[in-house]
Image (cartoon, rainbow, N blue to C red):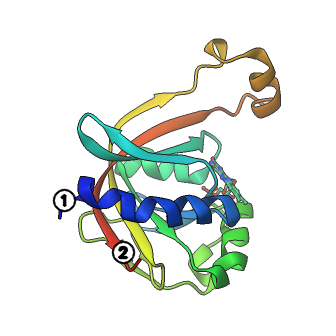
């Protein structure tokens, strides 16, 4: 079955977990080191007749640097007992901390990307960035700019083509 046909099967669990604990976005820099960052915002759907995972990453994140270097990422849907790991990955930066050491999570490289696949995750998306765009503050409603971007730390929207879904649901 193609990924496009398969997508519906994984979307409900992915969205539920994204709302609860967040998902773990994996990336690997040009130095070969991998990192995880928790994400709470994202979309899955079809654009350009391709399955796409859209993630919004602020320019201040270390992950932003790694995505710019590598052009690829994974999205790992954690299990319920990975809640503490999601907190750690959402509150510490890979600039200072090795989050795999800190959380005890194990990983291996993706089949199609160098970004990490977190062991034990029931769903993992391997994605290659097809397109990206910066949120343009002048085109957003003013209240949103003030609420979401008081420090003008805007998001880059990365449209990742889903190359592979590892799924156990
Ligand atoms: C539940 C949760 C959801 C988050 N969602 C996002 C997100 O969608 N985009 C983003 O840029 N940061 C998000 N963050 C913040 C980053 O995960 C956090 O700043 C992290 O420390 C960045 O790691 P890095 O510097 O290693 O990339 C979220 C944090 C939490 C706890």
| Image: 117 above or below 154 | below
Q: Secondary structure at mark 2?
A: strand
According to the picture, the residue beneath numbered tag 1 turns out to be: 2
At 75% across and 23% down in the image, what residue appears? Answer: 145
- Reading the chain from its start, which is encountered first: label 2 or label 1? 1
| Image: 107 above or below 17 | below
| Image: 93 above or below 161 | below
Where on the picture, by quarter, is residue 151? top right
Where on the picture, by quarter, is residue 27? bottom left
Residue 43 in the image: state x and y as whole percent.
Answer: 49, 45
Foreground of the two, 32 or 90: 90
Q: Residue furthest top?
A: 138
Check the picture and name the quadrant holding the C terminus.
bottom left
Foreground of the two, 1 or 113: 1
At 65% across and 43% down in the image, what residue appears? Answer: 60
Residue 65 in the image: state x and y as whole percent.
Answer: 51, 47
> In the rendered image, is residue 32 in sight?
no
According to the picture, the residue beneath numbered tag 2 turns out to be: 167
């Amino acid at each position: 079955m193609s990924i496009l046909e398969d997508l519906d099967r994984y979307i409900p669990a992915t969205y539920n977990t994204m709302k609860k604990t967040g998902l773990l976005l994996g990336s690997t820099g040009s130095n070969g080191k991998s990192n995880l960052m928790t994400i709470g915002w994202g979309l899955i759907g079809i654009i350009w007749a391709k399955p796409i995972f859209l993630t919004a990453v602020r320019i201040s994140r270390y992950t932003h640097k790694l995505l710019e270097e590598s052009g690829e990422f994974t999205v790992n849907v954690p299990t319920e007992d990975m809640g503490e790991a999601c907190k750690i990955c959402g509150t510490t930066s890979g600039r200072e901390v090795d989050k795999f050491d800190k959380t005890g999570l194990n990983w291996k490289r993706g089949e199609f990307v160098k970004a990490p696949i977190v062991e034990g995750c029931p769903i993992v998306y391997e994605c290659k960035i097809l397109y990206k765009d910066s949120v343009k503050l002048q085109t957003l409603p003013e209240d949103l700019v003030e609420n979401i971007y008081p420090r003008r730390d805007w998001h880059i929207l990365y449209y990742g083509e889903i190359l592979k879904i590892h799924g156990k649901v």
